[in-house]
Image (spheres, rainbow, N blue to C red):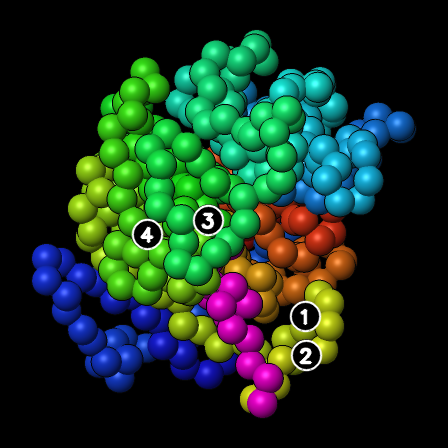
Amino acid sequence: MKNVALIALVFTGASLTAAAADLPTGSVPEIRFDSVADFLKLPPDMHLGEASGVAVNSKKHVFVFNRGNTNGPAYGATAAQVLEFGPDGKFLREIGKNLYAWSFAHTVRVDKDDNLWAVDKGSDMIIKFNPEGRVVMVFGRKKEASDEAGPWTRVTPPRPHVDGQFRQPTDVTWDPEGNIFISDGYINSRIAKYTKNGRWVKSWGERGTKEGEFNTPHSIAADAKGNIYVADRENSRIQVFDHDGKFSKVIKIDIPAPPDAQVWQGNAFTAANPPAGSRRPGSPWAICITPGPGTQYLYSADAYPGRVYKMSLDGTVLGMLGSTGRQMKEFGWIHEMACPSENEIYVAEILNWRVQKLVLHPAK
């Protein structure tokens, strides 16, 4: 395999710059892995729609947030459903059936106390469930049905932020103190911070390309020290902040797609028609960080060429796996990942309507 640049641009205080030629180069190993066949066992009359979210709790139960159970027309339908599975993939229950917040599923997470958090892009709401599956906290508010309840539209220049209000939020995470961080998302392009009790603290960021600015913060995760990692998807980078929003560094994955890389739909990219924005190789759609204590690893997934990258927390790429496709061990737009351990990853794919459990076999 040809040597490729592994780019981790680090900024501290005032902006620093580094040329790609000055950065270390080396071969990125392909990580061997298996996909557990027929892992999720659905009832005969139940089907997944676009699997947009996946999470795993301390009991190894798997939660899938999918755009299934739809009703209504193709446009404007309710498309959100949380399903719980046991460690063996056996279906256990549906959580939040007929919930007022359900509109268009985006991501699901589990906190350290096994509370479940669902982020609904369509209703602009984030819902916290206790382990029993009851609603215990609500963030955001959807438009009232008595009004003209159309979705938020994207305009130029963007509308100003409104504290406590979300416009197509994408994800949620927590620091060790339990503070809540919500990526707010497609319209507002910012990060919102709340206390563990749900009190508004602040927000930071706006649409742009500078450090501390975002263009679709699509996924968010925190490490054991409370640093916040934001997948700034359209800007093809991961930005890192402390838990008060102070900018720390940028991580960029600059590994070219292989010559035979496939796309899931449409024509292959060429030199005359290169991928851009969220389709650039390395553009982070989904990120997750393995739990502490001990060494933590950052995983990131792109849509093209459909790879998962294993990194140290400083952004060094340690290995990669996968490619675009419809077969097992191939991916169709990984939208969220859960990584309960270094060598066990769950990936939710919106184009292939499935969740795969991956077991990694890195070389010693």
Query: Is residue 8 left or right of 139 when viewed as pictured?
Result: left
Query: Is residue 50 left or right of 55 when viewed as pictured?
Result: right
Q: Which residue is mark 2?
A: 268
Q: Which residues are magenta?
A: 272-285
Residue at 59 percent across and 68 percent down: it is 305
- Camera-nearest residue between 269 and 361: 269
Element class at badge 2: loop
Query: Is residue 351 left or right of 45 when viewed as pictured?
Result: left
Tags 2 and 1 touching, CB below 8 Å: yes
Q: Which one is closest to the eye, mark 4 or mark 2?
A: 4
Q: Mark 2 to mark 1: distance in Å?
A: 6 Å
Q: Which residue is mark 3?
A: 187
Q: Mark 4 to mark 2: distance in Å?
A: 33 Å
Chief secondary structure of the magenta span?
loop
Vertical side of 8 occupied by 47: above or below: above
Q: Which one is closest to the eye, mark 2 or mark 3?
A: 3
Amino acid, disc 2 = Ala
**As drawn, which residue projects farthest toward the front?**
147
Amino acid, disc 3 = Ile
Q: Earlier in the sequence, mark 1 or mark 3?
A: 3
Residue 257 image offset from top left, x and y in percent: 54, 76
Residue 149 image offset from top left, x and y in percent: 62, 34
Q: Earlier in the sequence, mark 4 or mark 1?
A: 4
